[in-house]
Amino acid sequence: MKIAQLALALCLSTAVLPAFAADRPASEASVKRLIEVTDSKKLVDNVMLQMDSMMKASMKQALADQAFTAEQEKVMLETQDKLAGLVKDELKWEALEPMFLDIYQKSFTQKEVDGMLSFYKSPAGQAVIKKMPQVMQTTMQIMQARMSKLVPKIQQITAEGAEKMKALSPQPNS
């Protein structure tokens, strides 16, 4: 009887162990390899450059119709540089990499990371890696244009809502 139970337990463990192994979390080494293969550091660096350009363009656009003295302009540039430095320090690769490692290890199994590595090493995967920065930049530009068309409508709806709220507010007795 005990031999039959032992055999059954052995059969079950050999059938179930591969399923558990497939669900094991990704190793740090494999996630690091995935990050390396996908050139994630370069992608983050490119996003930072784009954010810096967008911040500068936004500030310039917001203040375009105002006249400033040379000193005011100097202060604005210093402020802009401080903001860019702050964002750069907080979002530099050395600060983000441990976060990415943790997120990927908690989110993906070893089998999934192995599959992604296979894909990103393939010609199609390499095309995705090379073309994704342009896809993201184009998407951001299109979204920015769409949002600029929405701003007047958002302002109008907000103003209408504020007017309705004002009309519903109790009027002070005069």
Image (cartoon, rainbow, N blue to C red):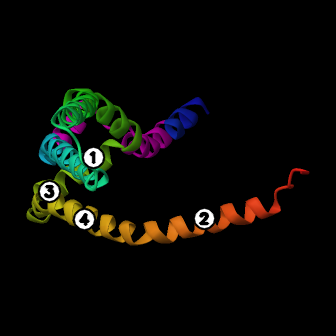
Tell me the CA gap for discs 4 and 3. Answer: 20 Å
Front disc: 3 or 2:
2
Q: Residue at x 28, y 29 (%)?
A: 90
> Circle 2 is placed at which residue position?
159
Q: Earlier in the sequence, mark 4 or mark 1?
A: 1
Q: Earlier in the sequence, mark 3 or mark 2?
A: 3
Q: Earlier in the sequence, mark 4 or mark 2?
A: 4
Tell me the CA gap for discs 1 and 2. Answer: 50 Å
Residue 141 is labelled as 4
> Circle 3 is placed at which residue position?
129
Asked whether disc 4 touches disc 2, contact meaning CB atoms under 8 Å apart, the reply is no
Tell me the SS state at disc 3: helix
Classify 122 as above or below 106.
below
Which three-letter amino acid code belongs to the residue tagged 1?
Val
Q: Position of residue 131 (x, y in %)?
A: 13, 62
Q: Position of residue 47 (x, y in %)?
A: 20, 47
Tell me the SS state at disc 2: helix
Which three-letter amino acid code belongs to the residue tagged 4?
Gln
Q: Are there few (<14), some (14-19), or many (20+) residues within 10 Å of tag 4?
A: few
Instruction: Please tell me which residue lies in front, 143 or 63.
Output: 63
Q: Residue at x 39, y 72 (%)?
A: 149
Tell me the CA gap for discs 3 and 2. Answer: 44 Å
Front disc: 4 or 2:
2
Asked whether disc 4 touches disc 3, contact meaning CB atoms under 8 Å apart, the reply is no
Tell me the SS state at disc 1: helix
Range of residues picked out in magenta = 10-35
Which three-letter amino acid code belongs to the residue tagged 3?
Ile
Instruction: Please tell me which residue lies in front, 4 or 17.
Output: 17
- Is 24 covered by the magenta stretch? yes
Asked whether disc 1 touches disc 2, contact meaning CB atoms under 8 Å apart, the reply is no
> Circle 1 is placed at which residue position?
113
Q: Position of residue 55 (x, y in %)?
A: 25, 46
